[in-house]
Structures are given as C-alpha cells and as structure tokens.
C-alpha cells in the first residue's frame, strides 16, 4: 500500500475536523454528543483557542491520546464509542500530534492524521488545468456557469443553441470568470435523468467551441464517466463530478488516465440525513479523496465542494456555511456553489432566481472569509465586484489602494 493511500485511509478513519470557534454552539453540540463523556459547557480558557473533533479511536489509543494532549497542556474529552473532542491552543494540539506520530504502530497513524488536519490550510500550489494554471490564494476564483440544458432551475438553459452558449461564456469571461463550467444535465430537485448520448449531444459542440475560443479553462459538469471521457477529448480540462468519484465507478479511472485534468469532487447524498451534518460531509469527502488516492489521482489536482443544495435541507445548507471551518482539515482547495439556490429564495421570502443575486454574493463573501478559494456562480459580474472588495480585506490590500493618498479633511 502506498503512503498516500495509507494517509487517505487514516484521514477517513479518524475524520478529524477543526471545530468552529466562532460558532460556540458547534463546540457545545460536539461535546454534548459525546454521550455524557464531557461537560458541554466547557468553553473557557484553551477551549476557545482550538478544538478538534475525532472519530474512530481504538480502545488501545485512548490512553495514549489523553496523555499526549494533557502533556501539551490541552484536554481530551473521549466517549466510549471512539469519538473525542480535543481542546487546547493549536500549539498544544500540534505537540500532541508529534508525540503520537513518534509513538508505536498504535498511535503513529493517528498522530499523522492529526498533524495533517492541523496543517490543512497551507498555501496551495497552482491548480493545473491542461496547459493553463489557476493560481490559488491571491484572489477568489470564479467559475461561471453555462447550462446546456432546456430545464435549468435558474432559467438560463441554452440547450441546442451553441452560439448562445458561446456568447454567454464569452460574456462571463469578460465579466471576470476564471473558468467556465458546462453542464448538460439539470441537477435541480425533481429533474428527469438524462442518458449519456443526450448529454453528449448537448455539451460536446459547446465544449469544442469554447476550448478553441476561450482564454480560460473549460470544465464539464457531469456524473458520467463516458461523458467525462468524451468531454476531455473535446477540450475540457476539468471535470466537475457531483458525486465526487462515488457515483460512476469508472469516473476515477478516466481521471487517472488524464493527469493533466483537474477534478471538482462534490459531496452529495440521497435524502437529508439526521446525524451530524459536518461529520458526514467531511467523511464523505474523505471517501472521495481515498478513491482518488487508490487510483493514483494526486490530491494536488482536486478541489472539494461540500454540495450546497445537494441532499441537504435549507437549514442544513445554512449550517454548512456556519460551520465551514470544520472542513479546513481536508487539505484541498474548497469550492462553494450557492448561486441562485432555493435556500436563498426561502430566506428572502420567496424571491425568484433572478432576485437572488445579493443573497448569492452574501454567501460567497461569508464562505471566502471562512477559507473558500473558488465559487461557482451565474452572475459573474456582480459577484466579481463584491469579491474584489472582500479579497482586498481578507487576502491582500491592492497596491493602488495602499498607495492612494488621503482624500483630505471632511466635515
């Protein structure tokens, strides 16, 4: 077994998540869920500085974990079923990870998984998409949406009209899109499935035209390996898989055969679930990472999408944003796709898709503040303007702003 696969297996086994200190309820609920193993009101001192949720502990690991954390000045609250919350400053948790990694076979993989989760938000190398590169971190990347469907929920489908699709894509790039995502099957609730031949008839002419004309990478939004294979041959340099390599079993081999192609692996599920939302999302995304590792797909090619609006209630969609920090230990760039979604309409009292731009931008800014590197949207111009301001605060003050003189006295 390769070290990459072993690390992915350990990451899935322990499913370590940085709990969200800016939403105290997240930590309180995590402690309360440990079946009486700890006081849910322990939110003082070091607990406010750092907290990690851990799963899958073997009984032989419990004592070693507790000793390692306490030796570094932290606290470990551990339930009988192998779940735990580790509390303490980040330096203490990192020290505990080093102690465990230096131990025997019982604790080494746990220590390595802890260290990897703590280091999850390191600077990212550029994302390769064919001959192009997408720089991560300097500014928020925007993926513009081109729906080559007749039944898009947002009313912007251009099925059968290649000229309209090309014109739309060119306008999105002019508005500031860093890449274009072309889809031929609607994913709105209640939409009818589309077979591969029909999907290919919709997307291939568009992909072929855009690959020749656009100065940015072109992605194909598909869950089918056969469509992905043909799309790559037509010029797509990214695959956006709404089932994150966990739907079509041939999707991973297709991506493995094309190391120059990037992948967005999204979280999805059938039904809404009733457990811990973020634990499930993180666990399923780690399953996608493990599938990728087993097929030799380097995680430097991957972007992870927690699936806003996919298999989640409206309240869960908002909870996803509230607790986004818990995905920070996954070690890959993160994408949010909230554009014009029905949850925004519900919050706004029934606003139709064309009146959800401000809500889309609000969610994008919140997500960028929590660490998102890429957003997928329809209204590129408005979102680009908003994110330029957000990036100026959250990432880097633009040189033109830094050098600008004072406007002078007022009043």
Image (cartoon, grey):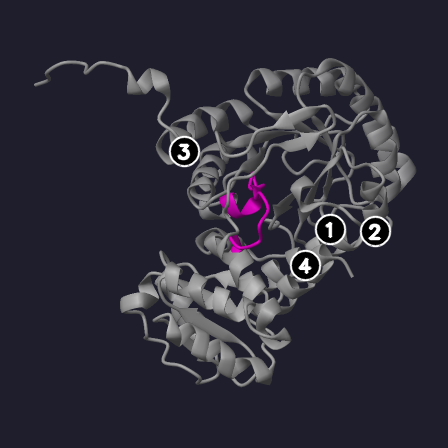
Please report whichever mark, 2 or 4, sits nearer to the chain's N-terminal start: 4
Q: Position of residue 122 (x, y in %)?
A: 50, 45
Residue at 55% across, 31% down:
141
Query: Is residue 219 depicted above or below 276 in this figure?
Result: above
Distance from the alpha carbon under mark 2 to that under mark 4: 20 Å
The circle on residue 348 is none
Mark 3 residue element: loop
- Report which residue position mark 3 lands on: 395
Mark 4 residue element: helix
For label 3, the crowd category at 10 Å Cα-Cα, with few meaning under 14, some 14 to 19 and many 20 or more, is some
Q: Are marks 1 and 4 in contact (CB under 8 Å)?
A: no
For the residues carrying marks 2 and 4, which lies nearer the camera in this image? Answer: 4
Query: Residue 387's image quarter?
Result: top left
Q: Are marks 1 and 2 in contact (CB under 8 Å)?
A: yes
**What secondary structure is the stretch in magenta mostly built from?**
loop
Q: Which residues are magenta?
A: 327-344
For the residues carrying marks 1 and 3, which lies nearer the camera in this image? Answer: 3
Query: Is residue 411 depicted above or below 332 in this figure?
Result: above
Q: Is residue 194 visible?
A: no
Residue 26 colored magenta? no
Q: Position of residue 55 (x, y in %)?
A: 57, 72
Instruction: List the single residue furthest toward the right.
Output: 197
Looking at this view, is 344 or 103 the one in front? Answer: 103
- Report which residue position mark 2 lands on: 248
Q: Position of residue 256 (x, y in %)?
A: 82, 43
The circle on residue 8 is 4
Please report whichever mark, 1 or 2, sits nearer to the chain's N-terminal start: 1
Please report whichever mark, 4 or 3, sits nearer to the chain's N-terminal start: 4
């Amino acid at each position: 077994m390769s070290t990459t696969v072993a690390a992915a297996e350990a990451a899935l086994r322990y499913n370590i998540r940085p709990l969200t200190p800016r939403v105290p309820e997240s930590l309180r609920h995590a402690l309360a869920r440990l079946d009486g193993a700890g006081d849910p009101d322990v939110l003082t001192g070091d607990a406010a500085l750092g907290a990690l949720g851990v799963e899958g502990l073997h009984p032989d690991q419990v004592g070693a974990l507790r000793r390692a954390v306490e030796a570094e000045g932290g606290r470990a609250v551990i339930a009988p079923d192998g779940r735990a919350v580790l509390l303490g400053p980040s330096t203490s948790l990192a020290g505990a990870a080093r102690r465990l990694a230096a131990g025997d076979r019982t604790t080494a993989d746990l220590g390595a998984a802890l260290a990897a989760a703590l280091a999850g938000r390191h600077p990212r190398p550029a994302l390769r998409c064919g001959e192009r590169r997408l720089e991560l971190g300097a500014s928020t990347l925007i993926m513009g949406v081109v729906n080559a469907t007749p039944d898009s929920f947002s009313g912007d489908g251009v099925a059968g009209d290649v000229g309209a699709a090309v014109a739309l894509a060119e306008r999105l790039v002019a508005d500031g899109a860093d890449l274009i995502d072309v889809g031929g099957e609607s994913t709105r609730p209640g939409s009818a499935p589309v077979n591969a031949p029909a999907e290919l008839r919709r997307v291939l002419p568009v992909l072929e035209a855009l690959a020749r004309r656009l100065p940015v990478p072109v992605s194909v939004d598909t869950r089918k390996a056969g469509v992905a294979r043909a799309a790559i041959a037509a010029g797509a340099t990214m695959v956006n898989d709404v089932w994150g390599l966990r739907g079509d079993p041939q999707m991973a081999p297709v991506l493995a055969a094309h190391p120059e192609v990037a992948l967005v692996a999204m979280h999805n599920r059938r039904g809404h679930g009733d457990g811990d939302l973020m634990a499930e999302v993180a666990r399923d995304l780690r399953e996608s990472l493990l599938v990728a590792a087993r097929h030799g797909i380097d995680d430097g090619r991957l972007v992870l999408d927690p699936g806003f609006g996919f298999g989640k209630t409206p309240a869960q969609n908002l909870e996803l944003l509230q607790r986004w920090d818990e995905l920070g230990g996954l070690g890959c760039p993160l994408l949010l796709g909230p554009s014009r979604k029905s949850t925004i309409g519900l919050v706004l009292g029934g606003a139709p898709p064309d009146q959800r731009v401000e809500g889309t931008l609000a969610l994008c800014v919140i997500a960028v503040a929590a660490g998102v590197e890429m957003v997928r949207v329809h209204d590129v111009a408005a979102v680009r303007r908003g994110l330029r301001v957000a990036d100026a605060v959250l990432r880097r003050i633009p040189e033109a702003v830094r050098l600008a003189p004072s406007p002078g006295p007022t009043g």
